[in-house]
Image (cartoon, grey):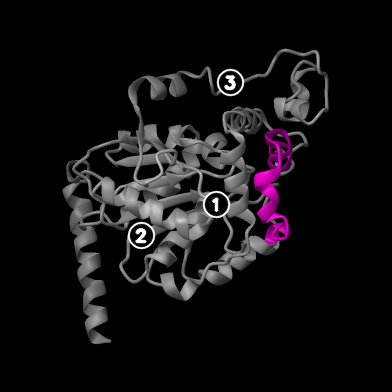
Amino acid sequence: MTRQAAGKNATPIWLKFLGHGDQSTTNTMEEIKVSPDYNWFRSTVPLKKIIVDDDDSKVWSLYDAGPKSIRCPIIFLPPVSGTAEVFFQQVLALTGWGYRVISLQYPVYWDLMEFCDGFRKLLDHLQLDKVHLFGASLGGFLAQKFAECTHKSPRVHSLILCNSFSDTSIFNQTWTANSFWLMPAFMLKKIVLGNFAKGPVDSKMADAIDFMVDRLESLNQSELASRLTLNCQNSYVEPHKIKDVAVTIIDVFDQSALSLEAKEEMYKLYPNARRAHLKTGGNFPYLCRSAEVNLYVQIHLRQFHGTRYAAISPAMVSAEELEVQGSHLSSNQDSDDDQ
């Protein structure tokens, strides 16, 4: 069923924010916020706040779940409008399978190198040598830039890029990137909401959009302005610096903020990447198509089982799988030796 068919009181809150629809309705339909899964997540996984910079105002907020003995976990990086909570379904599912999962949100950083330096300090603080990164939209771009920035002393073992991009010029906002800090919060939110789907969508996608709007509302002016600055300041990924990093690209076939050209550019940038296509899912498939996204993440991480870079507890991996993985690794080693 589409949200459009749900009745006149079902005006999505992101449209009301922009001044469309019935302003008198009070039904915001925040199904995710009242769902048992979300409430279970909030009640069982503590939110941690960590400062690693000299500036005490730069606070990393994160959820760290799963076996702490794992030294190469998967870390989730949110889009411009997201907080650490937006990946709660991945945290619940993957930790249930035995993985260590960290979902975080960034402090205010105005520069990509400043972000990379802060993220490196966070990994040092958490005593993590190398990690797997899942990045959505801006989160995926930051994940690529961090892998590029640390390529001489690698900190990223693999990347999962969901609805992400490699060049900020696709947004045609590089000329305004340096003025976001001047704009009031309501104007910044309108810029972000302008990329949200406005047509009829199914109920799960509508719930995902409403949840993301709620998360957007929780961000202050400097958080939003700094993220938009990182998202739009003139920069691109240098793929030759991260050619040895395993990559999976997750994207959707329906409407999203990314153009077809941006998706094609990602494919050209990573010709050897695994591709995971979702028929539908919009901008936030990790919320509205979580079962499929979780499966693709699991498939991506499975190639590292039985190695020092496994994100899963060895106790959760069967002996048969470890044997198969071990033989696969040895055959790869033999082929490398032959070359």
Nearer the viewer's eye, disc 3 or disc 1? 1
Pick the residue in front: 308 or 17: 17
Residue under the image location 83 percent in, 24 percent down: 21
- Distance of label 3 from label 1 (alpha carbons): 34 Å
Amino acid type at image mark 2: Val
Amino acid type at image mark 1: Trp
Predominant SS along the magenta part: helix
Asked whether residue 25 appears in the rendered view, the answer is yes
What kind of element bears circle 1? loop
Measuring from the top left, give residue 69's x and y in whole percent: 18, 43
Pick the residue in front: 184 or 247: 184
Residue under the image location 57 percent in, 54 percent down: 164
The residue labelled by disc 3 is 31
Q: For the magenta stretch, what is the residue range? A: 170-192
Q: Are the residues at dot 2 and dot 1 in contact (C-beta closer than 8 Å)?
A: no
- Distance of label 3 from label 2 (alpha carbons): 35 Å
Is 288 a magenta residue? no
In terms of sequence position, does the residue under pointer 2 or pointer 1 come before the other? 1
Quadrant where the N terminus is found in the figure: top right
Nearer the viewer's eye, disc 2 or disc 1? 1
In the rendered view, does 306 fall on the left or right side of 25?
left
Amino acid type at image mark 3: Glu
The residue labelled by disc 1 is 110
In the rendered view, does 120 fall on the left or right side of 269?
left
Q: Residues within 10 Å of mark 3 (few under 14, many from 20)?
A: some
Pick the residue in front: 126 or 240: 126
In terms of sequence position, does the residue under pointer 3 or pointer 2 come before the other? 3
What kind of element bears circle 3? loop
What kind of element bears circle 2? strand
Quadrant where the C terminus is found in the figure: bottom left
Please, is residue 86 above or below residue 7 in the view? below
The residue labelled by disc 2 is 156
